[in-house]
């Protein structure tokens, strides 16, 4: 019976990931008093830098200096530094065969292959299990309704399905968001005792809109549901309210990166708690200076335990703000603004976050429930294309209002093309990119 209940942990252990040791180490970090925690972070930062200076020729070539002097002298790593074969970046003593290897999704525009040593990867799973535990969700026993992409080749497809079976999860593919698909999803919820929903924000929001049309609350057909965890895409406040209303459960915002770890997770007080146990998170300005809490800048993250591959002061490609209420032991993410490369450049030379367009458009075209989802592409300096899925074509009035609002928030003279489509193309992983600049 115990084996069955701990199938997820057992599968990690059999794959060579020391999950028991990782849980013990994480527990000891979490039990540190504030002063001891500050010392732990300072020691761990210096220790990981020195480790890679001594054992990783690739990191030495970036670092330039021979020894660690101060944290501010540690260079910021960019994704462009990692655009070279993985074998060139691994630390001495590690080979492709004895590390965990994966590939980033490329949502930042720079996909690359990365590695973690097995203890570091076990720590990642310990962190995830710990945070989900805040909501009484257990990977070994809680049943997950998973809204994710799935490889469409036979080998990849069955590999993911096998992993799903070990992890007590059922996968709903995000590549088909039709009403017919949602109807079959609803039937699955009726007959399955799911504990929680987990997956890509945009697909889960579409399912909630389907329930809204049916005037249904999901817990009325699946009363075992406890929570919904959304990840990988922006969660807007009105979407969060829609999810909570039509699922009947708390909605938890997760922020993570496959190459690093779980970065931030909302607690029951709706605070977005940053992982300070295995990561060190900083916000920096355009000149790489560290900004105080409360100021907006680029998110730079250090993986404190990855010995196989350095991720030290690594610019993840996102912008955000750490709350003024943050402490070194409990940093709080106040705001995640989005990808730094999702920037629109306007004819006047003015720059604006791509999500600005998304916010403006969203507030107008979602009011009548006609438009299901949409994306925005910048074709040239003054031309933007809005691709949308809807039951009816956008009215002249709506189109004019969107153009007017864009000019009000941004500048005059912008051209907007509206293109209705039967469905929107998602990335291979199943994510939907809300704004893309083709400049």
Image: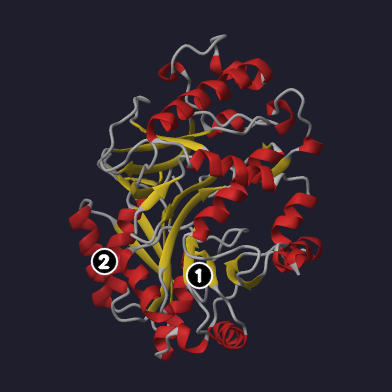
Mark yes or no: residue 387 visible: no
Q: What is the x, y in percent for residue 21?
A: 67, 42
User: What residue is pinned by disc 1?
Assistant: 203
Which disc, if any, is residue 320?
A: none
Q: Secondary structure at mark 1?
A: helix
- From this viewpoint, which residue is outermost toward the top? 66
Query: Marks 1 and 2, Cα distance to the nearest angstrom?
Result: 24 Å
Q: What is the x, y in percent for residue 158?
A: 78, 66
Q: Between tags 1 and 2, which lies in front?
A: 1
Tell me: residue 90, above or below residue 262: above
Q: What is the x, y in percent for residue 148?
A: 59, 65
User: What residue is pinned by disc 2?
Assistant: 402
Instruction: Check disc 1: other Cα within 10 Å, few if <14, some if 14-19, many if 20+.
Output: many
| Of residues 275 and 317, the one drawn nearer to the viewer in this rendering | 275
Instruction: Check disc 2: other Cα within 10 Å, few if <14, some if 14-19, many if 20+.
Output: some
Instruction: Report if the CB atoms under discs 1 and 2 are less than 8 Å apart.
Output: no
Tell me: residue 352, above or below residue 44: below
User: Which residue corresponds to the image point at 61% horizontal and 50% vertical from the top-left?
Assistant: 125
* Residue 176 placement: quadrant: bottom right
- From this viewpoint, which residue is outermost toward the left? 408
Colour mapping = secondary structure
Q: Secondary structure at mark 2?
A: helix
Q: What is the x, y in percent for residue 338?
A: 40, 49
| Of residues 135 and 251, the one drawn nearer to the viewer in this rendering | 135
* Residue 384 placement: quadrant: bottom left
Tell me: residue 319, above or below residue 414: above
Mark yes or no: residue 212 visible: yes
Q: Decide which of tag 1 and tag 2 comes sooner along the chain.
A: 1
Count up the numbered dots: 2
| Of residues 84 and 98, the one drawn nearer to the viewer in this rendering | 98
User: Which residue corresponds to the image point at 71% horizontal and 32% vertical from the top-left?
Assistant: 85
């Amino acid at each position: 019976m115990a084996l069955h209940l701990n199938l997820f942990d057992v599968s990690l252990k059999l794959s060579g990931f020391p999950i028991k040791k990782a849980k013990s180490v994480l527990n000891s970090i979490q039990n540190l008093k504030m002063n001891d925690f500050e010392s732990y972070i300072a020691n761990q930062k210096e220790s990981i830098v020195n480790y890679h200076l001594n054992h990783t020729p690739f990191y030495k070539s970036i670092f330039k200096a021979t020894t660690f002097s101060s944290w501010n002298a540690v260079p910021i790593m960019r994704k462009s530094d990692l655009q070279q074969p993985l074998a060139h970046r691994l630390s001495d003593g590690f080979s492709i065969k004895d590390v965990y290897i994966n590939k980033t999704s490329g949502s930042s525009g720079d996909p690359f292959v990365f590695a973690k040593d097995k203890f570091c990867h076990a720590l990642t799973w310990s962190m995830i299990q710990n945070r989900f535990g805040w909501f009484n969700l257990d990977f070994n026993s809680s049943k997950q309704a998973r809204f994710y992409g799935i490889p469409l080749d036979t080998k990849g497809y069955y590999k993911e399905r096998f992993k799903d079976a070990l992890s007590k999860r059922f996968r709903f593919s995000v590549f088909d968001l039709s009403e017919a698909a949602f109807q079959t999803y609803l039937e699955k919820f009726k007959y399955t005792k799911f504990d929680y929903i987990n997956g890509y924000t945009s697909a889960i929001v579409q399912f909630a809109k389907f329930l809204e049309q049916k005037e249904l609350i999901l817990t009325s057909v699946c009363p075992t549901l406890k929570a919904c965890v959304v990840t990988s895409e922006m969660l807007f406040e009105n979407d969060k309210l829609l999810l909570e209303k039509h699922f009947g459960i708390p909605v938890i915002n997760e922020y993570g990166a496959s190459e690093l770890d779980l970065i931030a997770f909302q607690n029951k007080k709706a605070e977005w708690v940053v992982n300070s146990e295995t990561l060190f998170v900083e916000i920096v300005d355009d000149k790489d200076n560290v900004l105080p809490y409360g100021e907006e800048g680029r998110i730079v993250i250090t993986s404190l335990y990855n010995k196989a591959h350095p991720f030290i002061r690594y610019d993840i490609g996102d912008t955000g703000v750490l709350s003024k209420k943050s402490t070194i032991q409990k940093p709080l993410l106040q705001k995640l603004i989005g990808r730094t490369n999702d920037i629109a450049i306007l004819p006047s030379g003015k720059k604006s976050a791509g999500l600005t367009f998304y916010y403006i458009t969203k507030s107008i075209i979602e009011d009548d429930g006609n438009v299901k989802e949409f994306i925005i592409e910048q074709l040239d300096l003054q031309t933007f294309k809005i691709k949308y899925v809807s039951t009816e074509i956008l009215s002249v009035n709506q189109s004019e209002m969107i153009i007017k609002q864009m000019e009000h928030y941004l500048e005059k003279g912008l051209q907007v093309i509206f293109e209705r489509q039967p469905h929107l193309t998602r990335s291979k992983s199943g994510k939907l990119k809300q704004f893309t600049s083709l400049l």
